[in-house]
Amino acid sequence: MAAQSTQISKPTSIPASKYVTLRISKFNPKKESSPKFIDFKVPYQKWTTVLDAILHVKQNLDHSIGVRYSCRQASCGSCGMKINGRPALACFTKIIELNSDVITVEPMNNFPIIRDLVVGFERMFSTHKKIKPYIIREDSEITPGTKEFLQTPEEVEKYIQFSNCIKCGLCNSVCPTMATDSSFVGPQALAQAYRYIADTRDKGKKDRLKIIDDSHGIWRCHFAGSCSQVCPKGVDPAMGIQLLRGYLLGFRS
């Protein structure tokens, strides 16, 4: 995929002393047979994020660029992409942190490309829903006389980090099994299965263990650990998967 012509942005209202080359992958699978890269010269300051740079290009140079974003503060998980070859959130990655004169942005692996940097999340959302990501118990509905379900700090500590998942898809994008098994449930869903199984308020452990105890479930994980390395919220899916195996093998109850 060869880079195309370089375009230089118009001066902005905020003086910029430095420029960076932003190399964006452009691809519409409905009209094109393969992706291509287009280079843009973009001004940046010390606070400029990769998402800021992409939106600058979209506003001033190429309105057709497809990119998904929302909160711009690493909370929604919408702007996941490959940045210089590594999956990350564009809104959470500053230009100066990359120490490079060329910033290459591409869509995440293991997801179908909708257009340019935007990928489809249907598979991830489907597997997430499959593991029943909610508290299961007969008395979960609020009725007169009911109270909150109290937990000790030690009980909360068992699952709290997994509650930080923002469903950005970065963990699934680097999973080698996701690339070879189209039916694999994936690290995101498995980590969330552990989140609810480890929650003392939940009574759906048997149901969830049956769901993941499958040839395309937890046993397909090869424990590469790459999923944990790219999580922007500090979640450790690899550890959650290993702890889940402890339940299935009878080491945990």
Image (cartoon, grey):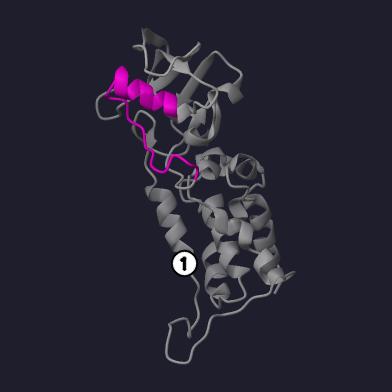
Q: Quarter holding the C terminus? A: bottom right
Q: Report x, y in % for residue 239.
A: 68, 54
Disc tally is: 1
Q: Which secondary structure type mostly characterizes the magenta part of the structure?
A: loop
Q: Report x, y in % for residue 112.
A: 38, 38
Q: Is residue 238 above or below residue 95?
A: below
Q: Is residue 126 above or below residue 8?
A: below
Circle 1 residue: 132
| Residue at screen point 68% across, 74% down | 152
Magenta run includes residue 54: yes
Q: On the picture, is 2 further left or further right than 185? A: left
Which residue, as the protein is rendered here, is positioned at the far right? 251
Is disc 1 surrounded by few (<14), some (14 to 19) or many (20+) residues within 10 Å?
A: some
Q: Would residue 214 be seen by someone viewing this image from the given angle? A: no
- Secondary structure beneath label 1: loop
| Residue at screen point 61% across, 19% down | 99
Tag 1: residue type? Lys
Q: Specify start and end residues of the magenta stretch as a single range.
A: 52-74
> In which image quadrant can residue 37 be found?
top left
Magenta run includes residue 237: no
Which residue, as the protein is rendered here, is positioned at the far top? 5
Nearer to me, 97 or 137:
97
Q: In this view, does 116 lie above or below 204?
A: above
| Residue at screen point 48% across, 33% down | 90
Q: Is residue 46 above or below residue 151?
A: above
Q: Report x, y in % for residue 158.
A: 68, 65
Q: Report x, y in % for residue 28.
A: 30, 27
Q: Quarter holding the N terminus? A: top left
Q: On the picture, is 63 further left or further right than 201? A: left
> In which image quadrant can residue 26 be found?
top left
| Residue at screen point 55% across, 23% down | 46
Which residue, as the protein is rendered here, is positioned at the far bottom? 145
